[in-house]
Amino acid sequence: MRRQRPGARHDESRTNAVKISDTVKTGFWQKTHHLDRMTLRELIHAYFQYPAIILYLGLAAAAGGVWLWRPAPLIQTLASIALAVLVFPLAWYVLHRWVLHSQWMWKHKWLAPTWKRIHYDHHQDPNNLEVLFGSPLNVVPTVAIATIPLGYMIGGTGAAAIAFGTGMITTCVNEFFHCIQHLSYKPRYAWIAMIKQRHMAHHFHDETGNFGITNYWWDRLFGTLYERIGDRKKSPTVFNLGYTAEVAEKYPYVADLSGGVATGHPRRRNKD
């Protein structure tokens, strides 16, 4: 069968939502869930049934078991926990800004599927709960690399284990507040309202700033924080991260996996 002309494929997809990667379909997750149509109670119900969150909590418990087996002294244990909590926002900022928002991963056939799954799909459909969570294949090694060596240098095996466990718990907290930011409700607490406003600006106004989720200190330090959308012009690539139909003509790997290049506002593309 003759292959469809790339331009035609992309044009045809303009009125359609981007195809989302297949994910684990078990129990509650046998259907797609959109946060803009869910209550907080429904989110909590879904969150603790998501396979990745169950895995992260299980790994944190296992890390706690390793600490009980080979405990580090109290000071080293507390220092490892504190350092893991402090390092997490920096590691997230670096990855979010220079990897997830990179324009080099889509150029390589073997990296394009990873980039599509871990971030492009999320920006194409920000409220789809299935693609909001990071892939464990990427998250777990990243947390391990960021925490285990630091903990080991502080207090050996026990401290390394507790640092990793802290990293996994911090990941779960970060993911939960990330869900809250996409949930269709007005937070009662000023801090939650603030981080929600900043993250929504990242998704719907200008994706080149506000890279934090719960911590925006590094955005402030590196000059990528903006408090109000009026502080910046709206980015033309806020939804596609620069992966346009023109780019797809040269680097078609993500478009081939997505069924084309979706255009327009995600909320209008995903009404059904």
Image (tube, rainbow, N blue to C red):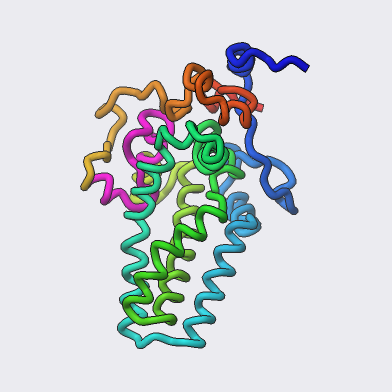
Q: Residue at x 35, y 40 (%)?
A: 198
Q: Residue at x 45, y 69 (%)?
A: 164
Relative image position of residue 208 (x, y in whole percent): 34, 34
* Screen quadrant of the N terminus: top right
Q: Residue at x 39, y 85 (%)?
A: 72
**Residue 113, picture quadrant:** top right
Relative image position of residue 71 (x, y in whole percent): 44, 87
Q: From this viewpoint, which residue is outermost toward the right?
A: 1
Q: Which residues are magenta?
A: 198-220
Q: Magenta segment: does it hold 258?
A: no
Taking 36 as reference, is 143 above or below it?
Answer: below
Taking 142 as reference, is 120 above or below it?
Answer: above
Q: Magenta segment: does it hold 219?
A: yes
Relative image position of residue 130 (x, y in whole percent): 61, 44
Taking 196 as reference, is 61 above or below it?
Answer: below
Q: Is 200 displayed left or right of 3 in the figure?
A: left
